[in-house]
Image (spheres, rainbow, N blue to C red):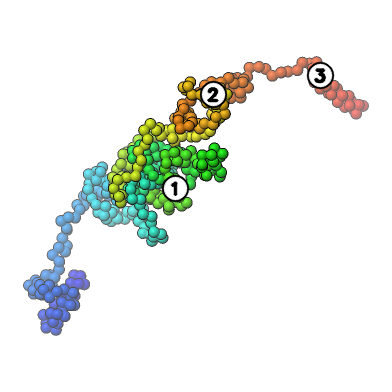
C-alpha cells in the first residue's frame, strides 16, 4: 500500500474510534465530507482492501502490445538508427504503417537505454526575437551550408536554400559541390518562378553577395552607385529587390534554424531513397521540401502576399549572369575571354569605343545589354599568329633550330679563344 493509503487507514480508525471528528478527518485527508463518508463506508464493508485502487496490478486496456514494442525497437536499430525520436514516429507511419505518437516512441526507446540524437536544451533568451514579416514575399532569407548529406562516405557538399520569413516556406533549394553563385542563382530562380519577386532579401556578407572592391568604378559612379555591386548584387538590384546583408548569423536566424532541421532529417530521407549522387539528390529535393513545407509552414499575420510578378519576356538566365563591360572595336566586334564576338543580327551596329555590358549565362551563352535592350552576339574566328598557335599547343613547331656554319665569325672567335687558351697552357708547362 502507498503512504497515502496507510494514512487514510490511520485517520479512519481514529474517526471510528471517536478520537477525531468528521471535520478534522476531512481536513487531514484533504477530501470533502461527502468523500469522507464514502471512504468510511467502504472501509467498514471491505476493510483495508477497499481503500486500494481497483486497477492496481491490472494491465491498462490502452497499453501497447509487447510485440509492437519489440518491432519498434528492431526497426530503429536496423533501419532508422540515424533519425531522432519525433522524426522516427513519422517514418513509422509513412513507411511501416505503424501509427504511434512521438511520446510513445520516445518512451519505448528510452526504456532500452537509447538516447535522443540531439537532446533538446532550453536556453534562456538573451534578446528579444525579431517578429516575422506580416505578409509572404516581404522578406526572403538565403544561405548555404556544407554537410555530409549522404553520409560520411560521400563527404561534405553544400545545400543552398531560401526561406520566406513570414510563412517559413522553403521557396527554393539546390545541392552543389561547394557554396557557389550557381547554387544561389538556381535557388532564387526556383522561388521567383514559383512564387514571384520578393520585396527584400537577407543574406550574409559572402563575396558572392558583395563586391570585394572598396570603391565603385567610373561607370558605376555615373550610374549613381555609391557601393560596388557583385554580379549577384546587380541582378538583385535589377529586379528591384532590397538586399540586406547581416552582420551576424543570429540576424538571419530563420534560415540558420532551418539548417538544424534539415541536417537532422534530410540525410535519413536521402538514405532511405537510396540516393548516392548530388544529381539524384537534386531530383528528389522538390518532393522532400514539399513535405517539409506542409509540416512546418505557418500562417502569415496578414492575408495576401507582397510578391511582384515576373515581367513578361524577362529571362532570369540573362538577369543572373556574369557581367563585364567591353568597348566596341572598329569592325563592330568585341573581345571577350580571348574570343571575338559580333552581333547576330546585321542591323545592330555600334559606334567605335561604345561601352556595352557583356553577360555570360551559366550555359555559356554570351549576350550584350545596351540602352535597355538585349543584343545577342555570336563567336567568330580570327586569324592568329603562328607563335600564338604554337604557344597554345594548337600547331606543332616544324622548323629546325638555326645552326651557324663552321666559318661563321662567332665560331671563329670561339676557335681563336680556345687556341689562345691552349697556347697559355703549353707555355706554363714548358
Q: Which residue in the protein does label 1 denote?
A: 244
Q: Residue at x 13, y 65 (%)?
A: 54
Q: Nearer the viewer, mark 2 or mark 1?
A: 2
Q: Nearer the viewer, mark 2 or mark 3?
A: 2
- Rendered image: mark on residue 54: none
Crowdedness near tag 2: few (<14), some (14–19) or many (≥20) residues, C-alpha within 10 Å: some
Tell which residue pokes out farthest to the right in this image: 430
What quarter of the picture does the N terminus occupy?
A: bottom left
Determine whether 48 is above or below 375 in the image.
below
Asked whether, in this view, residue 53 is left or right of residue 423, the answer is: left
Q: Residue at x 42, y 39 (%)?
A: 239
What quarter of the picture does the C terminus occupy?
A: top right
Whether tag 2 and tag 3 are in contact, CB under 8 A, the answer is: no
Q: Residue at x 91, y 26 (%)?
A: 427
- Rendered image: mark on residue 332: 2
Q: Which sits in the foreground, 226 or 127?
A: 226
SS class of the residue under badge 3? helix
The image quarter containing residue 362 is: top left
- The image shows residue 327 at horizontal and vertical percentages of 56, 30
Tell which residue pokes out farthest to the left in this image: 45
The image quarter containing residue 128 is: bottom left
SS class of the residue under badge 2? loop
Q: Residue at x 21, y 72 (%)?
A: 3
Whether tag 1 and tag 3 are in contact, CB under 8 A, the answer is: no
Asked whether, in this view, residue 76 is left or right of residue 203, the answer is: left
Please report whichever mark, 1 or 3, sits nearer to the chain's N-terminal start. Answer: 1
- Rendered image: mark on residue 409: 3
Can see residue 276?
Answer: no
Q: Which sits in the foreground, 352 or 33?
A: 352
Amino acid at each position: 500500500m502507498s503512504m497515502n493509503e496507510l494514512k487514510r487507514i490511520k485517520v479512519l480508525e481514529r474517526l471510528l474510534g471517536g478520537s477525531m471528528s468528521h471535520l478534522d478527518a476531512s481536513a487531514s485527508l484533504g477530501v470533502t465530507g461527502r468523500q469522507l463518508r464514502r471512504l468510511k463506508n467502504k472501509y467498514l464493508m471491505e476493510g483495508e482492501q477497499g481503500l486500494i485502487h481497483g486497477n492496481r496490478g491490472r494491465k491498462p486496456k490502452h497499453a501497447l502490445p509487447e510485440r509492437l514494442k519489440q518491432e519498434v525497437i528492431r526497426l530503429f536499430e536496423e533501419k532508422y538508427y540515424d533519425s531522432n525520436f519525433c522524426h522516427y514516429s513519422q517514418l513509422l507511419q509513412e513507411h511501416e504503417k505503424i501509427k504511434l505518437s512521438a511520446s510513445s516512441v520516445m518512451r519505448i526507446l528510452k526504456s532500452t537505454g537509447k538516447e535522443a540524437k540531439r537532446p533538446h536544451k532550453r536556453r534562456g533568451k538573451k534578446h528579444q526575437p525579431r517578429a516575422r514579416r506580416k505578409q509572404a514575399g516581404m522578406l526572403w532569407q538565403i544561405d548555404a551550408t556544407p554537410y555530409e548529406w549522404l553520409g560520411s562516405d560521400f563527404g561534405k557538399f553544400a545545400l543552398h536554400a531560401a526561406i520566406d520569413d513570414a510563412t517559413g516556406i522553403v521557396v527554393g533549394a539546390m545541392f552543389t559541390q561547394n557554396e557557389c553563385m550557381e547554387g544561389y542563382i538556381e535557388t532564387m530562380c526556383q522561388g521567383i518562378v514559383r512564387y514571384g519577386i520578393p520585396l527584400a532579401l537577407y543574406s550574409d556578407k559572402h563575396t558572392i553577395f558583395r563586391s570585394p572592391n572598396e570603391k565603385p568604378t567610373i561607370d558605376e559612379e555615373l550610374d549613381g552607385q555609391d557601393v560596388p555591386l557583385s554580379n549577384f548584387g546587380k541582378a538583385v538590384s535589377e529586379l528591384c529587390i532590397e538586399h540586406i546583408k547581416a552582420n551576424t548569423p543570429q540576424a538571419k536566424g530563420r534560415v540558420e534554424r532551418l539548417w538544424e532541421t534539415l541536417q537532422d532529417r534530410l540525410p535519413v530521407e536521402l538514405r532511405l531513397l537510396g540516393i548516392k549522387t548530388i544529381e539524384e539528390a537534386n531530383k528528389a529535393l522538390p518532393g522532400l521540401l514539399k513535405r517539409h513545407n506542409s509540416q512546418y509552414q505557418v500562417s502569415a499575420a496578414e492575408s495576401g502576399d507582397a510578391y511582384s510578378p515576373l515581367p513578361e519576356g524577362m529571362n532570369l538566365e540573362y538577369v543572373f549572369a556574369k557581367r563585364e563591360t567591353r568597348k566596341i572595336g572598329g569592325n563592330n566586334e568585341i573581345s571577350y575571354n580571348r574570343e571575338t564576338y559580333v552581333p547576330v543580327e546585321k542591323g545592330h551596329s555600334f559606334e567605335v569605343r561604345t561601352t556595352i555590358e557583356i553577360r555570360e549565362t551559366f550555359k555559356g551563352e554570351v549576350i550584350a545589354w545596351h540602352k535597355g535592350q538585349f543584343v545577342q552576339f555570336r563567336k567568330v574566328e580570327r586569324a592568329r599568329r603562328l607563335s600564338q598557335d604554337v604557344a597554345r599547343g594548337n600547331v606543332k613547331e616544324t622548323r629546325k633550330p638555326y645552326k651557324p656554319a663552321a666559318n661563321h665569325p662567332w665560331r671563329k672567335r670561339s676557335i681563336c679563344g680556345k687556341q689562345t687558351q691552349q697556347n697559355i697552357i703549353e707555355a706554363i708547362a714548358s
